[in-house]
Amino acid sequence: MAKLPIVDKDKCIGCSTCSVLAPKTFKLGKDGKAEVIDPPGDEEEKIKEAIDSCPVDAIKFAE
Ligand code: SF4
């Protein structure tokens, strides 16, 4: 299973890039910020791409 990412909601600006790149792992919540679907349904590679594409660096893998 792919590692679990975490989103820093204070940083997230709700641009939806992560939920487009890895839709089985990220969704936008009612507050318009990204939430992580647990367990993540995308390949780790896709999740990593989403992490790298976040414009405000709000996502990282949980330790
Ligand atoms: S890519 Fe980053 S800023 Fe955009 S919705 Fe995802 S966590 Fe938020």
Image (spheres, grey):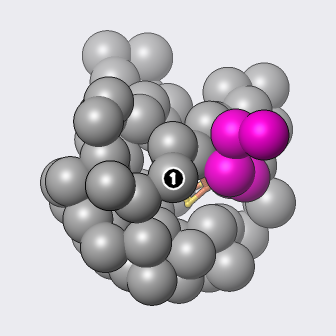
Residue at 40%, 58% in the rendered image: 2
Q: Position of residue 61 (x, y in %)?
A: 68, 51
Residue 10 occupies quadrant: top right
Task: Say if residue 17 shows up in the picture.
Answer: no
Q: Is residue 49 magenta?
A: no
Within 10 Å of disc 1 (Cα), the crowding (few <14, some 14-19, many 20+) is some
Q: Is residue 35 above or below residue 54?
A: above
Query: Which range is magenta?
Result: 59-63
Residue at 29%, 36% in the rendered image: 39
Residue at 56%, 75% in the rendered image: 48
Q: Is residue 60 magenta?
A: yes
Q: Quarter holding the C terminus? A: top right
Q: Quarter holding the N terminus? A: bottom left
Q: Position of residue 22 (x, y in %)?
A: 31, 67
Task: Say if residue 49 shows up in the picture.
Answer: yes
Left or right, 50 with reference to 39: right
Q: Helix or strand or loop: what does disc 1 sit on?
A: loop
Q: How many marks?
A: 1
Residue at 80%, 60% in the rendered image: 57
Spot the residue most to the top: 30
Camera-nearest residue between 63 and 58: 63
Left or right, 33 with reference to 51: left
Residue 44 occupies quadrant: bottom left
Residue identified by numbered label 1: 3
Helix, strand or loop for the magenta stretch, by majority: strand
Q: Is residue 62 above or below residue 17?
A: above
